[in-house]
Every structure is written in structure tokens, then in C-alpha cells.
Amino acid sequence: MFPFKIASRFLRYSLGQTILIIVGIAIGVSVQVFIGLLIQGLQKDLVDTTIGNSSQITISPVRGEDAIQDWETIYSDIDADQPDVNALSASADGPAFLIGEDQGDSVLIRGWEFDRAEGIYGVEEKITKGSLPSEGEVLMGVTLQEELGLSLGDEIDLVTPEGTTETFVLSGFFDFKVSNINRSWLLTDLKTAQDLFGLDGAVTSMEMQVEDVFAADLVAESIGEGLDPSLVEITNWKEQNEELLSGLNGQSISSIMIQVFVMVSVILGISSVLAISVLQKSKEIGILKAMGIKDGSASAIFLLQGLILGIFGAILGVALGLGLSVAFTKFAVNTDGSPIIALYLNYEFIALSGGIAVVACLLASLIPARKSLKLNPIEVIRNG
């Protein structure tokens, strides 16, 4: 392809200038990739910290109802009709008092089907000692365990507000990294909790997580269409965390603005340099036109220059951006050596950033391409 050969020759002829343009493009792309991945990683950390191990959509009985009776039918309907729900668990919860020698500690009994709840809470990885409870056993938080000085296999007495008293065996201890949870939650299997609170097979809530956390409100709305609003109500994390959602949206907007300004500066820089290149190479372009090259082919030379610069600049920029991201996770660390913001590789975003850089370079090359159309070969050769 003749225009491509001429474009590559022009770039090789002014090699220093070409390298400078590619480095400029690369810096712009690297800033875009680094900032984008950094903010996405921060958002992912915030989401994981706040709702990563908790219910994102919750079905609960309406005021005046104590429990969800037909929960198994609801479970089957959601499981069959909602592919975006990737974890669904029923829960039987209720308050109780842990009777000790000197005092009664208020605790929250949570009864789960642990194989289903695992997808939401990740209980197994949070067990510091012991194992998941079976019928008649409970898991206790490490904070409460330390306060009471209890050991694995000890028996505890629990009394409900209705006056029911039961004795349970400690099957293990958990650490959710949240002091209030470690202090107040006692975990047991679903049947044990149902029997303790006299629920007769019912549950007090149904909890779930979804594939896209930011679509939780849409999924909740879809689920709610199949529920009886006189018996149950449905809530999602976006309704209950409006401040967090506003902060995440603000981060996304600031990231987009920074990336837009960076790419605009790259486009202006490439346009000005290639426009100067038209003047520098005007004699050569004039001779080529005098030899019979068409205006379209002359313009294609500068478009191809922009494409070549964009491809090499995008590749180098993505590499630099990833290098900056990795370096940030190595130097910005917590006291325990873990990164303040974990590296999050969004391959679609990385590819998009590189693609935008290439398209931006093509757009930037339109200006010099149009200038080349106006060159009159006779006047160029006559004026030297």
C-alpha cells in the first residue's frame, strides 16, 4: 500500500519527533489507565467492605407479620426466574439473652442453611476455630468469646423474650472483622433457630446477592413483581446506602472527567504536531501530487501516520499504566503489608482506553489530512 509506505517513511525520517509523539500519547493513555483502574479498585474495595459479605436484596415480612410462611415457593421462583441472583439464602433470626453467672448478654441468633448462606457471608473462611454448627450447636464471635472466656465445646444457655430456654454447645468461633457482629451474633443452623423461636418451619427473611451490585434495585423491582405486598416487602442496598452510592457516582464522574481532559490534550498535541508535519513535508507532498498521486491518497498518508502513532502510543501507554498500578500496590500499603487499594484489572476498560487513544489519534490526523488536500503542487514546487 503506497500511502502506508510513505507514511512510515515520513515517521522514520523524523524519528526523534515520532518517538516524542508516541511518548506523549503513551503518557496520556497511562494516566487514563492508572486513574481508571485506581478508582475502579477503590470502588470495588468500598463495595466489598460495605456490602460484599452482606445481603444486597432482602425480603422480609411486612409490619404486623412475624415470618415468611411460603418462603420455599418464593425461593424456587427466584431461583428459576432471576439469573442475576447468584446467592440466595433464608434466615431465621431473633433476639435472645445469653445467661451467665453474673449477667445476661443480649445476642442475635441467626439461623442459616450454611451451604446457601456461604455465597453471601463466606462463613467458613471466617471461622477461626472449630467448625460449622449442626443442630443444637452455635458459632460465637471472637469478641464475645474473649469477654466471656469460653472455649470450644462449652455449653451456653439462651433464653428468648418469650421465656424459652435452651442449652447449646459451642461448635466454633468466627471473626467477621466487625466488632459489633463479633460481639452480638450467634450463628446456628436454620432448623435450630426455627425451633427456638417457634417459627414452625417459617423464616424471618430471605437474603441474596446479585451479579451486578449496581443493578440491585432493578433486580429487586423484578422480584417484587411476583410477591404479595400485603405479606412481604423487598429492600435493596442502594436504598439503604444513598451516601455511599453518591460517593461512588462522584468518583466515577471525576474519573471520566480526568480521562476526557487527558485525551483532549493528547488530540490537540497530535493535531498540532502533524499539522506542522504537513508544512515540513509540503514539498514532498507537492512532488507526489505532481507525479500523479490523488488527493485522497495524500490525505491517507497523514491518517495512516495518526493510526501508526496511536497504535504504538496505546500499547506503550497501557504497559506504563499497568506498571504504575502495580507499583502503587507495592508502595501504598497498610501496616500489615497489604495494599491500601488492591489491584483490579478490568480488561474491558484497558482495551477501551487503548482503543480510544487510537481513535483519538485518527481524529487528530484529520486536520493535517485536510491541509494536505489544499496543497497545490505547482505552487509548492515553484516556491521550493
Image (tube, helix red, strand yellow):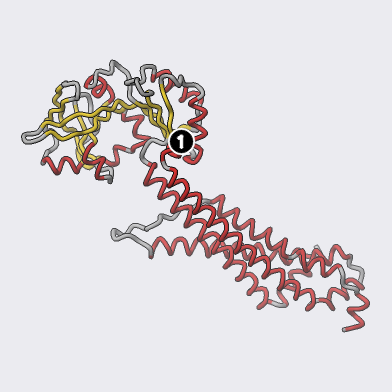
Q: Is residue 75 left or right of residue 175?
A: right
Vertical relation: 343 (above or below) 120: below
What residue sits 75% from the left and 64% below the top?
304
Residue at (87% x, 84% y) in the render: 384
Q: Which residue is mark 1?
A: 210
Q: Residue furthest bottom?
A: 384
Q: What amino acid is found at the position of numbered circle 1 in the picture? A: Val
Whether 31 is drawn above or below 153: the answer is: below
Q: Quadrant of the N terminus?
A: bottom right
Residue 221 percent coordinates (x, y): 51, 30
Q: Report whether 261 appears left or right of 101.
A: right
Query: Residue 110 location, x and y as percent?
Result: 27, 30
Number of numbered tags placed on the structure image: 1
In percent of width and height, residue 301 lies at 79, 66
Q: Which residue ends up furthest to the front in the rendered image?
A: 64
Please tell me in which quadrant of the rendered image residue 50 appears: top left
Would you call the spot at circle 1 few (<14 residues within 10 Å), some (14-19), or many (20 or more)?
A: many
In this rendered view, identify the residue nearer to me: 164 or 80: 164
Q: Residue at x 90, y 80 (%)?
A: 381
For the residue pair 140 and 324, the one nearer the viewer reads as: 140
Asked whether 93 or 377 is in front, the reply is 93
Pick whichever, 372 or 2, lies toward us. Answer: 372
Residue at 34% x, 20% y: name it.
65
Above or below residue 201? Residue 323 is below
Note whether 324 is above or below 47 in the view shown: below
